[in-house]
Every structure is written in structure tokens, then in C-alpha cells.
Amino acid sequence: MRMRTLIFWSFLASADTAFGACETPKSPEIADGLTATKIEMVESKKMVSHYLKSSKEYLACLKAAEALDEIEKPKIQGGYTENSEKYVSAVSEMSRVKDAFMHQVSLFKSR
């Protein structure tokens, strides 16, 4: 069972890298909590949720590609590969988007 899972992820990662690698999701625009309507805030929540879901898929893609490339590609200075840097950058952006949205929600609720 474990071997099948490894083969599946290896195949999936190789397919992703063969077709242009992992695609970075675009950060959503977040409604201004001071001026937005409730409908706009709900729509922002949906966009942020979709972005976070897409980002998690992107991170999984990077991990799978990293596992495949680990043997083939030497690590760059500092011990990080290109995918490691992309992973850290994506996690930082996810945190920034979530924090920005939560800030706008608190502004919306304070009106």
C-alpha cells in the first residue's frame, strides 16, 4: 500500500513537472472592511477560502516535485532548493492573505 502511494505521488509529480511544474495561485483582492457590504465581505471570504485551498494544493505539488528532484538536483547555497524557497514564499503569502482578511473582518464588525 505504501509503495503504491509513493508510485502514485511520483507519477503525479512527474506529470506536473512535465507540463510546466506547479502553478502559483493568484492572491485574491480583499474587500475593505470599512466600506464593504455584507455581501462583499462574504464574497471576499469565499475568494480567500478558495485561494487558501489552491495554495495548499500548490504546496503539495511543490513537495511532490521536491521529492522527485531531491536526487537529481543539487541543493543551492544554504541547503535550500528552488522549490523550498517557493514553498516558504507561498506559506508566507498564505499567512499574509489570511491576516489581511481577518483584519478587514474586524474592521467590518467594528462599524
Image: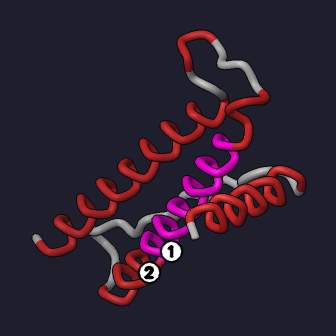
Asked which quadrant contains residue 76, the reply is top right
Q: Residue furthest bottom?
A: 39
Badges 1 and 2: C-beta atoms under 8 Å apart?
yes
The residue located at (55%, 53%) in the rendering is 59
Residue segment shown in magenta: 47-67
**Residue at the spot 73% in from the left edge and 56% down from the top edge:** 10
Quadrant in which residue 68 is drawn: top right
Q: Residues within 10 Å of mark 1 (few under 14, many from 20)?
A: some
Which residue is under mark 1? 50
Which tag is nearer the camera, tag 1 or tag 2? 1
Residue 103 vs 1, above or below: the answer is: above
Residue 46: give its label.
2
Q: Is residue 109 left or right of residue 98?
A: left
Badge 2 amino acid: Lys
Report whether 36 appears left or right of 67. Answer: left
SS class, disc 2: helix
Q: Is residue 98 above or below residue 66?
A: below
Which structural element holds mark 1? helix
Q: In the rendered view of the protein, which quadrant contains the N terminus? A: bottom right
Residue 40, x across and y down, in percent: 40, 82
